[in-house]
């Protein structure tokens, strides 16, 4: 039984990170909305728009069968490139340069550092083109959303079935 005062936790957490006021940094939020639409109400899944809360989200990862993080992540690819990463590769990712630049990599590093009990953590990341102040996604990132949502949906199905592994398929946007 969960020690969560709000009751038992859902098996899988789908957590979007990012700031929609920084253009492509809002991509995770868009993918989260699409997943919620596809899945509908399901007590086995918690869908959370974590925005820019950074390390304040750490406790959400605890006691999950799996966590799927969705974020705009710089990986050096072309804008709109979709990366799917699993532990331990996730823990080796880039760090933000200030307290306001927390990302999926830092969240996972903090989880490991604190000994948080959690199942596998996977990241669906989209290479951003524009991260400056403004609203709306770049054409490259907008075009990648359906593919990223498909990948996240597949990962969610695998997580619910208890089959989350290191091999992750990819798609072309």
Image (cartoon, rainbow, N blue to C red):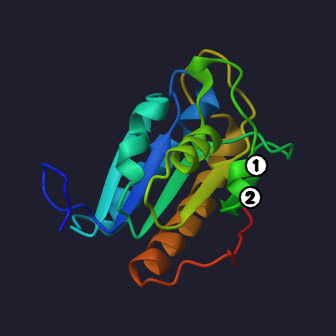
Q: Position of residue 68 (x, y in %)?
A: 50, 59
Residue at 50 percent across and 28 percent down: it is 20
Query: Residue 56, image x and y in percent?
Result: 40, 32
Depth check: give the residue in front, 28 or 158: 158
Residue 53 is situated, as x and y percent measured from the top left of the image, at: 43, 29
Reading the image, the residue beneath label 2 is 89
Toward which corner of the image does residue 75 lie, by quadrant? top right
Indicate the quadrant where residue 84 lies: bottom right
In this rendering, the answer to whether 9 lies above or below 154 is above
Image-quadrant location for residue 72? top right
Label 2 packing within 10 angstroms: few (<14), some (14-19), many (20+):
few
Measured as percent of width and height from the top left, residue 63 is found at 35, 62
Q: Do the residues bearing badges 1 and 2 touch, measured as CB atoms within 8 Å?
A: yes
Q: Quadrant of the N terminus?
A: bottom left
Which residue corresponds to the image point at 75% horizontal and 45% vertical from the top-left? 93
Position of residue 102 relative to residue 159, above or below, is above
Residue 92 badge? 1
Query: Helix, strand or loop at disc 2?
Result: helix
Residue occupying image coordinates x 56% and y 29%: 136
The front one of 102 and 150 is: 102
Closest to the observer, 23 or 139: 23
Disc 1/disc 2 C-alpha distance (Å): 5 Å
Question: In which quadrant of the rendered image does the C terminus lie?
Answer: bottom right
How many labels were placed on the picture?
2
């Amino acid at each position: 039984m969960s020690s969560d005062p709000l009751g038992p936790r859902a098996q899988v957490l789908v957590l979007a990170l990012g700031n929609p006021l920084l253009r492509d940094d809002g991509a995770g939020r868009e993918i989260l909305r699409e997943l919620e639409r596809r899945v509908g109400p399901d007590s086995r899944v918690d869908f959370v728009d974590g925005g820019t809360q950074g390390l304040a989200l750490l406790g959400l990862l605890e006691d999950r069968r799996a966590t799927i993080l969705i974020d705009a992540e710089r990986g050096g690819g072309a804008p709109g490139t979709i990366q799917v990463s699993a532990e331990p590769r996730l823990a080796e990712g880039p760090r933000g340069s200030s307290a306001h630049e927390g990302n999926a990599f830092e969240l996972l590093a903090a989880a490991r550092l604190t000994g948080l009990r959690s199942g596998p953590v996977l990241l669906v990341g989209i290479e951003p083109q524009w991260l400056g102040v403004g609203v709306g996604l770049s054409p490259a990132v907008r075009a990648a959303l359906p593919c990223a949502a498909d990948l996240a949906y597949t990962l969610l199905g695998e997580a619910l079935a208890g089959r989350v592994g290191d091999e992750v398929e990819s798609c072309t946007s």
